[in-house]
Image: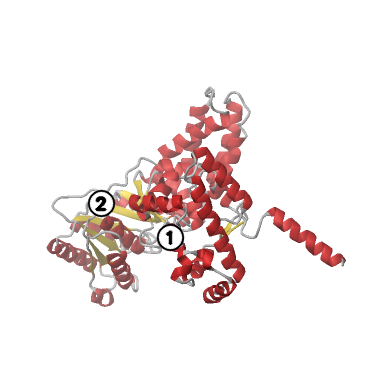
């Protein structure tokens, strides 16, 4: 979500390259660009002023480290200030003994509060906590049914052996509507049920409004007074920018919130809320929602977010995502297969599914250092991966085990079965055989040898990454050289 901001930061700091000393004039020039970039990203004005003043103070007259260039030194200063602005790291959830720990979720309508309740339940379930989710939103039509569907989905499919319970009184919605006391009574009965079921955590999904008003705050303060929750989290929609900060400030003044959960962080928003909400409310950002699936809830790490903003990537988060999908034993078994050149199409399909579970391809590529800024004008077609799965599914077990048995008639059958062309099938098989041969060849190489081999592989076949359009070296419609040959052929054909 920080592509535009990242580009502006990099452009501003790049101007310092080639200078032997960070002076007041060149720093002020760079900070004018940074200030504009932050304001365009919808960062709160007070935050922009304080941030720029602090960076300027840190940078003035600072000698450039011998091993670094001025631009790199400045990136380090800006990075530290960004971490301070969004930090500290505080994603732990306070648990009480005996349970249940009561977590109260609040926020405006449309912020993703109900979905976030399900994601938080999945997060706790994966960590061995038994959870109950209570539908205390008696205002919005179908809110109870939505939460029920989300909770059942989490109970059945989320990782972990812990249980996820759902508590609701659907008849109260239709009968009483706006009555504040009914929501309070429901939460009290949910707590009693949670104690009987001996759950570890009770999550209260409270009602939201389209805007902050006395009625909304009255209901929330009544629930807070009656149940005395251990944690109050505010769910904030990152897409609404400056308004998100204003609403967060109003909620904090009334409710004294313990933390913020930013949702819709995978969208093409400007990112101002992430940089402003901690400064304005004083409450730490606990989690960020990075997708629609119930497992798309990440702990918020300021230093990683600062790395994304400055184009340095977020390799740690990428590795953590990979570790969630592939165990160490599976990775070792796969490495042994690759070293022996025994990789099969079933193995390829398994790896493809693991990657897809990690999140959208564009989001994953954006975590690689230096790649985020290249993705702004790149079209990433995740449906291309569906087509690859379709081709593999159309193969027989024998063909998946050994692709060398494929001939023209088998290829035609596979293309018809998968709704693709024979050229698509041949292309996949060719790339698979190249990877198979290269992995066997690389098994005895050192790090530098493997790097050279990968460079050679990408040079000989720039289409190794399907679904990417617009990124140099990763084109999905053939290399520049191939395109040039096709143009010359067409020109000759016209002359004839």
Q: Nearer the viewer, residue 314 or 109?
A: 314
Element at label 2: strand
The residue wearing badge 2 is 231
Q: Where is residue 111 in the image (x, y as percent from the top left)?
A: 40, 60
Q: How far apart are marks 1 and 2 (CA)?
A: 44 Å
The structure residue drawn at horizontal position 43% and vertical position 63%, both measured from the top left corner, is: 346
Q: Would residue 111 appear left or right of 49 to someone viewing this image?
A: left
Mark 2 surroundings: few (<14), some (14-19) or many (≥20) residues within 10 A:
some
Element at label 1: helix
Residue lying farthest to the right in this orientation:
496
Position above or below: 99 against 74: below
Residue 357 image-quadrant placement: bottom left
Position above or below: 239 against 258: below
Q: Where is residue 180 in the image (x, y as percent from the top left)?
A: 25, 66
The structure residue drawn at horizontal position 27% and vertical position 66%, both measured from the top left corner, is: 155
Query: Does any portion of residue 311 appear in the rendered image?
Result: no
Q: Where is residue 186 in the image (x, y as percent from the top left)?
A: 20, 67
Mark 1 surroundings: few (<14), some (14-19) or many (≥20) residues within 10 A:
some
Q: Which of 217 and 379 is in front in this view?
A: 379
Q: What kind of colouring is applied to the model shown?
A: secondary structure
Q: Position of residue 271 (x, y in %)?
A: 48, 50
Tally of numbered tags:
2
Q: Looking at the image, tell me whether mark 1 or mark 2 is earlier in sequence order.
A: 2
Position above or below: 223 against 452: below
Q: Which of 160 and 434 is in front in this view?
A: 434
Q: Quadrant of the C terminus?
A: bottom right
Q: Which of 85 and 15 is in front in this view?
A: 15
Query: Which is closer to the viewer, label 1 or label 2?
Result: 1
Q: Would residue 145 appear left or right of 481 to someone viewing this image?
A: left
Query: Does any portion of residue 256 appear in the rendered image?
Result: yes
The residue wearing badge 1 is 347
Residue 177 image-quadrant placement: bottom left
């Amino acid at each position: 979500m920080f592509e535009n901001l990242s580009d502006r930061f990099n452009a501003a700091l790049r101007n310092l390259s080639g200078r032997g000393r960070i002076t007041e004039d060149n720093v002020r020039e760079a900070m004018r660009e940074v200030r504009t970039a932050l304001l365009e990203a919808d960062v709160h004005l007070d935050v922009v002023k304080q941030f720029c003043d602090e960076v300027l103070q840190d940078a003035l007259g600072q000698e450039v480290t011998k091993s670094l260039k001025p631009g790199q030194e400045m990136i380090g200063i800006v990075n530290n200030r960004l971490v301070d602005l969004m930090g500290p790291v505080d994603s732990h959830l306070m648990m009480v003994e005996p349970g249940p720990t009561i977590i109260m979720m609040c926020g405006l309508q449309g912020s993703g509060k109900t979905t976030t309740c399900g994601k938080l339940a999945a997060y706790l379930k994966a960590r061995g906590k038994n959870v109950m989710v209570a539908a205390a939103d008696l205002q919005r039509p179908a809110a109870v049914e939505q939460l029920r569907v989300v909770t059942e989905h989490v109970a059945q499919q989320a990782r972990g052996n812990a249980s996820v319970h759902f508590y609701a009184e659907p008849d109260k919605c239709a009968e009483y509507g706006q009555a504040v006391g009914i929501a309070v009574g429901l939460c009290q009965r949910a707590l009693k049920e949670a104690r009987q079921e001996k759950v570890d955590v009770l999550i209260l999904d409270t009602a939201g409004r389209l805007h902050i008003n006395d009625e909304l705050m009255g209901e929330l303060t009544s629930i807070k007074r009656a149940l005395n929750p251990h944690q109050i989290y505010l769910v904030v929609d990152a897409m609404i920018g400056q308004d998100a900060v204003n609403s967060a400030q109003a909620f904090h003044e009334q409710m004294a919130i313990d933390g913020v959960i930013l949702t819709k962080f995978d969208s093409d928003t400007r990112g101002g809320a992430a940089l402003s909400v901690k400064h304005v409310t004083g409450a730490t950002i606990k989690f960020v929602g990075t997708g629609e699936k119930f497992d798309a809830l990440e702990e918020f790490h300021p230093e990683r977010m600062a790395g994304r903003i400055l184009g340095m990537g977020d390799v740690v988060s990428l590795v953590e995502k990979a570790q969630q999908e592939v165990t160490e034993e599976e990775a070792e078994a796969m490495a042994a297969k690759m070293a022996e050149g025994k990789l099969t199409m079933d193995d390829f399909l398994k790896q493809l599914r693991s990657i897809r579970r990690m999140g959208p391809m564009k989001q994953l590529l954006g975590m690689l250092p230096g790649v985020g800024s290249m993705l702004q004008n790149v079209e990433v077609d995740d449906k291309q991966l569906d087509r690859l799965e379709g081709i593999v599914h159309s193969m027989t077990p024998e063909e998946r085990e050994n692709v060398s048995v494929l001939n023209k008639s088998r290829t035609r059958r596979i293309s018809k079965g998968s709704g693709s062309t024979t050229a698509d099938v041949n292309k996949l098989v060719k790339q698979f055989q190249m990877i198979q041969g290269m992995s066997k060849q690389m098994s005895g190489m050192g790090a530098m040898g493997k790097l050279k081999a990968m460079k050679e592989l990408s040079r000989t076949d720039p289409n190794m990454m399907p679904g990417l359009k617009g990124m140099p070296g990763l084109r999905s419609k053939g290399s520049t050289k191939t395109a040039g040959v096709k143009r010359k052929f067409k020109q000759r054909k016209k002359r004839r």
